[in-house]
Image: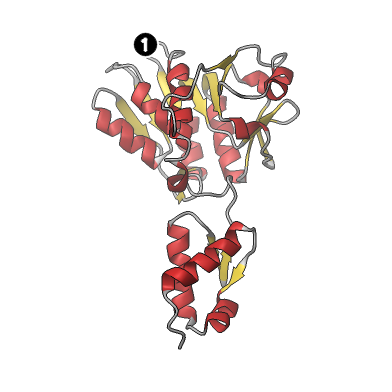
């Protein structure tokens, strides 16, 4: 058997995945002269780092859309915090808030006002955990089967639970946004869940990182006109947001990233 170090082998596999190449465990085992079990361990390790998506017999590259939630949490943290701080200013005392699963919405938890009457509803494990640590907020966690890409529950159980609520303000997660198709999602189940939440929501807010205006996702969630407030980054190109203003006049730029260098 090949004595090549596993970390070196994983680096080669990771580079191929980063270039958009799918990999097959059996072929890699022959190439590196190791067992398929060794390759499967490599792929499990890479998947745990958010570098690939395991499929039967191998693995597929991940895009920004399909990276699991845990792999997105620490990316561009300062920019996400800037959006979150500004979006939190829209919250009124005593509102019931829905924080949709997403790494930018996770940053909102830090900036929520202290209010023991404020009820936070979420389908996200990470957001629920962060709210629970606050101790000055009430929490409802919508259950069901957890989708690892979403980082929360979007199955029929979660849809039914959301449909029984009344939400004052929803902070909607979106995979992409444009004037023609509105807010979109990669997963059909996620889009269905988001629509169920919007059906019981009074006000909808979107925190949009710059890449949301250029990424495409196949499932429509809602038109731009149903979004009351869109909070965007300080350096978002005007051509990305100016077309949206007729449908959603309330588009607000933040000043600068919250934490320089992150």
Hey, which quadrant is residue 84 in on the image?
top left
Q: Is residue 104 left or right of residue 213?
A: left
Identified at 43% across, 69% down, the residue is 7
Q: Is residue 172 left or right of residue 136?
A: right
Q: Residue at x 51, y 48 (%)?
A: 149
Residue 9 image position (x, y, % from top left): 49, 72
> Which quadrant: the C terminus?
top left
- Lateral position of residue 2 relative to residue 210, left or right: left
Q: Would you say residue 60 is visible in this rendering?
A: no
How many marks overall?
Answer: 1
Rendered residue at 47%/83% (across/down): 35
Residue occupying the far front of the picture: 261
* In the depicted structure, whether residue 51 falls above or below residue 55: above
How packed is label 1: few (under 14 Cα within 10 Å), some, or many (20 or more)?
Answer: few
Q: Is residue 7 visible?
A: yes
Rendered image quadrant of residue 136: top left
Looking at the image, the residue that sits furthest to the bottom is 1
Q: Quadrant of the N terminus?
A: bottom left
Residue 180: x and y, percent?
A: 76, 28
Q: Say what secondary structure mark 1 lies in.
A: loop
Q: How is the image coloured?
A: secondary structure
Q: Position of residue 150 (x, y in %)?
A: 50, 44
Out of 66 and 237, give the one closest to the viewer.
237
Residue under the image location 42 percent in, 73 percent down: 6
Depicted 116 relative to depicted 8: above or below: above
The residue singled out by tag 1 in the image is 93
Q: Is residue 241 above or below residue 66?
A: above
- Seen from the viewer's position, the closer of residues 114 and 201 is 114
- Left or right, 56 with respect to 219, comes to left
**Residue 5, how many percent across, how many down?**
42, 75
């Amino acid at each position: 058997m090949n004595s090549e170090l596993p970390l070196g082998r994983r680096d080669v596999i990771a580079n191929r995945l980063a270039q958009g190449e799918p990999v097959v465990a059996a072929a890699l085992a022959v190439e590196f002269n190791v067992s398929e079990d060794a390759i499967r361990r490599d792929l499990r390790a890479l998947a745990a780092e958010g570098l690939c998506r395991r499929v039967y017999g191998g693995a597929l590259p991940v895009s920004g859309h399909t990276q699991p939630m845990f792999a997105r949490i620490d990316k561009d943290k300062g920019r996400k915090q800037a959006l979150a701080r500004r979006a939190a200013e829209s919250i009124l005392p005593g509102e019931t808030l829905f924080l949709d699963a997403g790494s930018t919405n996770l940053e909102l938890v830090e900036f929520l006002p202290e209010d023991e009457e404020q009820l936070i509803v979420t389908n996200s494990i990470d957001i629920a955990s962060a709210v629970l640590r606050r101790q000055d907020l009430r929490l409802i966690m919508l259950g069901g089967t957890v989708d690892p890409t979403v980082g929360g529950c979007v199955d029929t159980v979660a849809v039914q639970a959301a449909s029984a609520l009344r939400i004052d303000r929803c902070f909607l997660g979106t995979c992409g946004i444009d004037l023609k198709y509105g807010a979109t999602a990669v997963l059909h189940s996620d889009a269905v869940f988001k629509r169920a939440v919007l059906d019981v929501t009074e006000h909808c807010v979107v925190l949009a990182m710059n890449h949301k205006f250029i990424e495409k996702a196949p499932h429509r969630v809602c038109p731009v006109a149903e979004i009351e407030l869109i909070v965007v980054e300080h350096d978002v190109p005007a051509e990305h947001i100016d077309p949206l203003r007729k449908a959603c006049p309330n588009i607000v730029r933040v000043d600068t990233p919250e934490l320089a260098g992150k």
